Image: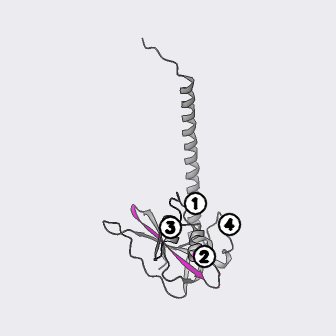
Amino acid sequence: MIRLRRPSPFALALTACGVAAFIALGIWQLRRADFKQALLARFAQASHAPLQPFARVERGAPDAVYPHVRVHGSFAAHRLYILDDQTHADQVGVDVFAPFAPDNRDRVLLVNLGFLPRQGVQQALPDLPPLPAGETGLTGIYAPPPRPGLKLGGNALPNQKAWPKLTTYIDLPDIGADLRRGLYPRVLLLDADAA
């Protein structure tokens, strides 16, 4: 005959805490999934929205709206920021950001030029395409910058003297300080068909 032992109060409390923790984690994951779905819906809506002038939204767009804008200005020559450790379609690479000075504006708009995969066996940084010189028109979605994960090691930008500068997160105040210019609170995600 098998004798069943009664669990101790500590074991019961530990089990109850474990069950509560897993339920809380499940609820957190469901909320996170809802947030991601809403975020994807905002981007889908924005990509099909009619273009509007950047001047209409530069002073502030509602948090839940990502306007589809057209802006004219010029890129800061030879000034690129490389966001490292990115993945796209199972490839490791970088996102390339460039400062863009809109016409007759005192602040700089950071433009996400897109993803480039790392090259070769040693995963070297990719060759960066040249930026257009002079006056340029851009279209894209005016959206918040990518959220940083853990900011380990502090801001490495002031220690780098050569361009392009490599970073593991996009922090607009840090980049503004590095450029010695004010930055807009969002970035421009170029339209997919932009040259």
Query: Where on the picture, by quarter, is residue 139?
Result: bottom right
Label 3: few (<14), some (14–19) or many (≥20) C-alpha neighbours in 10 Å: few
What's the magenta bit mostly, secondary-structure-wise? strand
Disc assigned to residue 39: 1
Q: Earlier in the sequence, mark 3 or mark 1?
A: 1
The colour scheme used here is: one colour
Q: Amino acid at mark 2?
A: Val
Q: Is residue 114 at least partly visible in the picture?
A: yes
Question: Which residue is drawn at the image coordinates 57% and 47% (left, top)?
Answer: 28
The region drawn magenta spans 88-109
Contact? badges 4 and 2 (CB < 8 Å)? no
* Disc with the residue nearer the chain's start (1 vs 2): 1
The amino acid on which the numbered mark 1 sits, given as a three-letter code, is Leu
What's the residue type where badge 3 is placed? Ala
Residue 17 at what x, y percent from top left? 57, 34
Between the residue at mark 4 and the residue at mark 1, the CA separation in whole angstroms equals: 14 Å
Q: Dot 4 corresponds to which residue? A: 62
Tag on residue 156?
3
Tell me the quarter of the image containing the N terminus. top left
Q: Secondary structure at mark 2?
A: strand
Proximity of marks 3 and 4: CB atoms separated by less than 8 Å: no
Give yes or no for residue 5 being in the magenta stretch.
no
Residue wearing tag 2 = 69
- Tell me the CA gap for discs 3 and 1: 30 Å
Residue nearest the observer in this picture, 124 or 69 = 124
C-alpha separation, residue under disc 3 versus residue under disc 4? 31 Å
Within-10-Å neighbours for mark 2: few <14, some 14–19, many 20+: many
